[in-house]
Image (cartoon, rainbow, N blue to C red):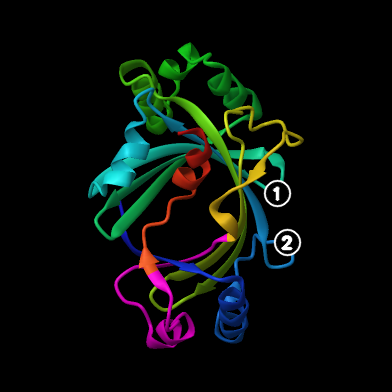
Amino acid sequence: MQFRHELKHEITASDMIAIRQRLRAIAIPDPHTIDGKYLIRSLYFDTPEDKALLEKQSGVSRRQKFRIRYYNGNKSVIHLEKKSKVGGLGTKVSAPLSEEQAGKIVKGDIDWMISEDNSLIKELYSKMVGERLRPRTIVDYTREPFIYGPGNVRVTLDYNIRTGMLNTDFLDTECITLPAADGICIMEVKWDNYLPEIIRDAVQLKYARTGSFSKYEACRQPMI
């Protein structure tokens, strides 16, 4: 399992425009984008006691979260993901899900998961039974991703964050979502063993605040 360095910055819309222009000159857009961006829809899981949310708010160093995700409204490619954090390092493992499987998980029909060969699906089943992990909220946003070969760098610009509030039917592309995070834009920089100076300079902002902004946390705030 490869852990990567991760840094997040809360930035303004004008900062994002400036950084986007710099990155276009030195990096390339992720080839999976449409016109340089894609729309992400995620469904995040948590316990009835909000374990994942409270660990994030308390700054617990070692934590993990589960989510189901698809892009650009395309439900033919859905992934179950587990994101793990240890300090400033992070890693992600994923498993493919069919639309039917994702729909069953959302509805709480999970008995089929125990017989699946994929270990991540079985792990989610174990968490849903043992810790009562359940879908909690939809998180939508727009992402502009850039990649740079040396250092295996990935820089993402995320904005237009929206919450599904209590709605967990994330397969309904017409469901109502509401703006969250007060228009905040998030720049995230990930790399393996080193961050090239050219990227460091491109993402440098005098007043940017380094932090651990969580879209899930932001999208849960109206409910707590």
Q: Secondary structure at mark 1?
A: loop
In-front residue for pair 197/168: 168
* Residue 72 numbered tag: 1
Q: Is residue 208 above or below residue 5?
A: below
Q: Which mark is residue 172?
A: none
Circle 2 Cα neighbour tier, 10 Å, few/some/many (<14 / 14–19 / ≥20): few
Q: Is residue 106 visible?
A: yes
Secondary structure state at the residue bearing disc 2:
loop
Is 93 above or below relative to 131? below
Residue 102 in the image, given as x and y percentages of width and height: 58, 27
Q: Of residues 111 and 208, which is closer to you in this image?
A: 208
Q: Is residue 105 left or right of residue 73?
A: left
Q: Which residues are magenta?
A: 184-209
Between disc 2 and disc 1, whose residue precedes?
2
Residue type, numbered disc 2: Ile
Return the mark for residue 34. 2
Q: Residue 3: in sight, yes or no? A: no
